[in-house]
Image: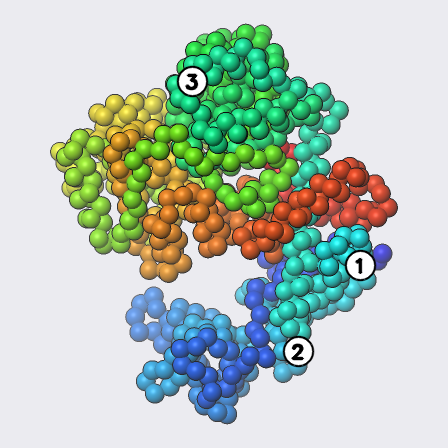
């Protein structure tokens, strides 16, 4: 038991870790012994596959072990350092060139033994490697597989290996949280053996088996957390078993100006089934751009009103809220329901009347932005909460809205199309519906990647479109306000339309751009385009820091065709429908995630005229360019999400506010799709048989669940929790 408790001791419990070293580890995100043990190797160097310099084949990816003979630092021009390392092994000489890695000269010295992995080239009479993986090799390395652990400036990978080895000794006899029956069923090694093997494997197969065991545990624990938290939301409360055959549902079907697609009809029925249950529903509709998620949500709201309840619909921006009020709201009103719109800019007198009607029960449906979460928004009987673009809201925000009712059903909409495996990993406590068919497919669009130096190609396409009477979007990553304007803007929009808060992994709305980075800012770009590129056309600016009435005016003028070129930030990413807009130019496209770019390009090609999208980038980095080329290869959001997952971390797809992503260190949702499905089913079966994990064979599992997620509850908080 002492070894089990040691897992959650502070780092100083590990022999050799004093407070200064613990502080360095905390800077790397490690606080407890278990954090050190789950700081898994980033890669392995297979010393059993080492080649001598003489026998290594030109053009091959090889591992070579040798001794550093000399280290030189060259500086051929400003901002460029070249470290040249000469390595010998008794059979030949290898020249290693590392660009802008000046620190290598301090890390390596003559006489040091190193292992190098990279592509072997031949130039100027020598075998060479450029920017290979370089790892110092101790003479007492155990086995043939050298793990390369995460390191920092004060702690090398070699030192990390020593710390991990001591932590393993300290916790060697810890209890295994997975019941024996489960391990036997899935042929999983014990956790103690898996931890030792993942850190210090004797073969790559052993490392893979260890990873499989630990990855299964990761996903199982996240699934158990989400499912138990989801149950807690409605524990002790009586949820509404909604009816789906009432007069408002029938009236909505009658006034709907189009026939539902097969996908929409299936999603509507799945939603009705979830809402009809005696427990609070947690349902998510995942659909690509233009697949009609809000039409399905409308049927859910009609069912709520038919059942004597009210519905709240939360959307992230005022632009989108206005769109929903105009389209969805009018449809619901034609079906006989009473609908209103509440935003941060709603006049005080209108707001007071609206909230009075909501509290008395005479208002059926309230669409709104963050203003819905204010304390004075008190519906009489809220039985359904709809959250559109749910990934844009934090856990606390979603929870505040759900608290407006007594165990209301929750419906989440997202236009970020993600594979089922990722949906289960992130939202395993939800029932899911997918929409892939587009009711109004439009004429589609083509996507082209353009170097920044060649963006005249995009401008020429825009000019041709304008000459035909069409309209153009130009999307920028930054606003470009000066410091005074930035402070004023921060006080105006109070979190609504704040794209930087929604997408913290990219520098967008309100970000302070690096003056040397060459990024295009919207304010400056609008001025440049008016003067130099489109002087004969109306060019206007739209971004989240503008006052609400000004944003509304700009969008209305663009929709009416008065504005021909709209320079905007990602405030137009969702909900903006202007069929006459046929060209989109995205500046610094490499600064955005693929899911975000896909959302943006969904704004063009919505009418009868095909759209053209130009992704402008100055990047020379191959990973960034490969991501952009994926946009050219497919217009299918689900396939694109698969490609994005293959190129990026899971947590980057939906933003770091999402559940589960930070807990999954070893799970790859593309490669491990079958494992995720199995772990999801396994968690459901465990809780069906033992809802509170009180059985003796689940005691270690219950303890692990409490321990892992207790102190970091906010990090692993779940949708619907």
Q: Residue at x 45, y 21 (%)?
A: 343
Residue lying at the far bottom in this picture: please name it: 90
Disc nearest the viewer among 2 and 1: 2
Q: Which residue is mark 2?
A: 143
Q: Which mark is residue 339?
A: none
User: Residue at the spot x=45%, y=52% of the render?
Assistant: 643
Could you tell me residue 696's position as x and y percent? Answer: 86, 46
Name the secondary structure under disc 2. loop
Please say if 451 is above or below 68: above
Where residue 545 appears, x then y in whole percent?
37, 32
Identify the residue at horizontal 75%, vertical 24% (top origin).
Answer: 236
x and y, in percent, of residue 631 in the image: 36, 48
Marks 3 and 1 close (CB-CB < 8 Å): no
Labels 2 & 3 near each other (Cβ < 8 A): no
Q: Is disc 1 placed on a helix, strand or loop?
A: loop
Taking depth in this image into account, of 37 and 175 the one nearest to the observer is 175
As drawn, the label of residue 174 is 1
Q: How is the image coloured?
A: rainbow
Q: CA distance from mark 2 to mark 1?
A: 25 Å
Residue ID for mark 3: 256
**Quadrant of image for the N terminus:** bottom right
Q: Extreme front residue here?
A: 262
């Amino acid at each position: 038991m002492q070894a089990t408790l040691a897992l959650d001791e502070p780092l100083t419990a590990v022999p050799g870790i004093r407070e200064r070293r613990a502080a360095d580890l905390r800077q790397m995100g490690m606080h407890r012994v278990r954090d050190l043990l789950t700081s898994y190797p980033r890669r392995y160097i297979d010393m059993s596959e080492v080649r001598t310099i003489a026998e290594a084949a030109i053009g091959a990816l090889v591992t070579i072990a040798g001794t550093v003979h000399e280290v030189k630092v060259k500086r051929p021009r400003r901002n460029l350092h070249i470290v040249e390392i000469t390595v010998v092994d008794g059979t030949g000489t290898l020249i290693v060139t590392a660009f802008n890695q000046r620190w290598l000269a301090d890390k390596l010295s003559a006489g040091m033994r190193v292992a190098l992995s990279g592509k072997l080239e031949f130039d100027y009479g020598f075998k060479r490697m450029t920017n290979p993986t370089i790892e110092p090799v101790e003479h007492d390395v155990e086995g043939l597989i050298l793990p390369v652990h995460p390191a920092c400036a004060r702690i090398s990978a070699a030192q990390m290996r020593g710390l991990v080895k001591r932590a393993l000794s300290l916790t060697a006899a810890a209890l295994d949280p997975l019941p024996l029956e489960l391990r036997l069923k899935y042929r999983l090694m014990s956790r103690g053996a898996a931890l030792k093997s993942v850190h210090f494997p004797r073969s790559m197969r052993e490392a893979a088996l260890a990873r499989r065991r630990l990855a299964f545990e990761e996903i199982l624990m996240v699934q158990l957390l989400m499912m138990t938290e989801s149950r807690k939301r409605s524990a002790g409360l009586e949820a509404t078993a909604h009816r789906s055959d009432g007069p408002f549902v029938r009236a909505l079907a009658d006034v709907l100006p189009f026939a539902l697609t097969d996908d929409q009809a299936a999603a509507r029925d799945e939603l009705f089934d979830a809402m009809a249950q005696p427990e609070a529903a947690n349902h998510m509709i995942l659909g690509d751009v233009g697949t009609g998620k809000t039409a399905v949500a409308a049927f859910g709201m009609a069912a709520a009103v038919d059942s004597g309840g009210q519905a709240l619909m939360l959307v992230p921006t005022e632009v989108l809220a206005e769109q929903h009020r105009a389209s969805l709201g009018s449809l619901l009103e034609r079906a006989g329901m009473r609908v209103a719109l509440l935003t941060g800019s709603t006049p005080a007198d209108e707001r007071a009347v609206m909230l009075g009607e909501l509290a008395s029960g005479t208002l059926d449906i309230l669409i709104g932005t963050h203003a819905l979460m204010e304390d004075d928004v008190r519906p009489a009987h809220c039985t359904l909460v709809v959250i559109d673009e749910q990934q844009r809201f934090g856990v606390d925000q979603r929870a505040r809205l759900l608290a407006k009712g007594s165990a209301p059903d929750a419906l989440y909409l997202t236009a970020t199309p993600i594979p089922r495996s990722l949906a289960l990993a992130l939202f395993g406590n939800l029932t899911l519906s997918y929409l892939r068919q587009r009711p109004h497919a439009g004429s589609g669009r083509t996507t082209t990647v353009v170097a920044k130096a060649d963006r005249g190609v995009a401008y020429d396409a825009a000019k041709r479109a304008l000459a035909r009477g069409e309209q153009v979007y130009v999307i920028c990553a930054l606003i470009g306000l000066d410091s005074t304007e930035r402070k004023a803007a921060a006080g105006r929009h109070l979190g609504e339309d704040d794209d930087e808060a929604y997408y913290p992994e990219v520098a967008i709305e309100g970000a302070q751009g690096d003056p040397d980075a060459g990024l295009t800012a919207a304010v400056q770009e609008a001025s440049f385009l008016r003067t130099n590129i489109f002087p004969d056309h109306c060019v206007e600016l739209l971004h989240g820091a503008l006052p609400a009435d000004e944003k509304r005016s700009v969008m209305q003028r663009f929709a009416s065709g008065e504005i021909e070129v709209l320079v905007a930030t990602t405030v137009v990413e969702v909900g903006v429908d202007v069929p006459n807009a046929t060209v989109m130019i995205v500046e610094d496209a490499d600064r955005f995630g693929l899911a975000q770019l896909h959302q943006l390009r969904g704004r063009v090609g919505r009418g009868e005229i095909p759209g053209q999208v130009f992704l402008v980038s100055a990047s020379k980095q191959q990973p960034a360019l490969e991501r952009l080329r994926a946009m050219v290869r497919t217009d299918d959001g689900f396939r694109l999400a698969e490609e994005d997952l293959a190129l990026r971390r899971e947590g980057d797809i939906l933003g770091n506010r999402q559940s589960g992503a930070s807990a999954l260190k070893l799970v790859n949702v593309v490669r491990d799709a079958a494992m995720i499905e199995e772990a999801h089913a396994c968690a459901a079966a465990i809780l069906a048989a033992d809802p509170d994990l009180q059985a003796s064979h689940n005691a270690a599992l219950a303890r692990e669940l409490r321990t892992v997620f207790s102190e970091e509850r906010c990090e692993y908080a779940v949708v619907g929790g």
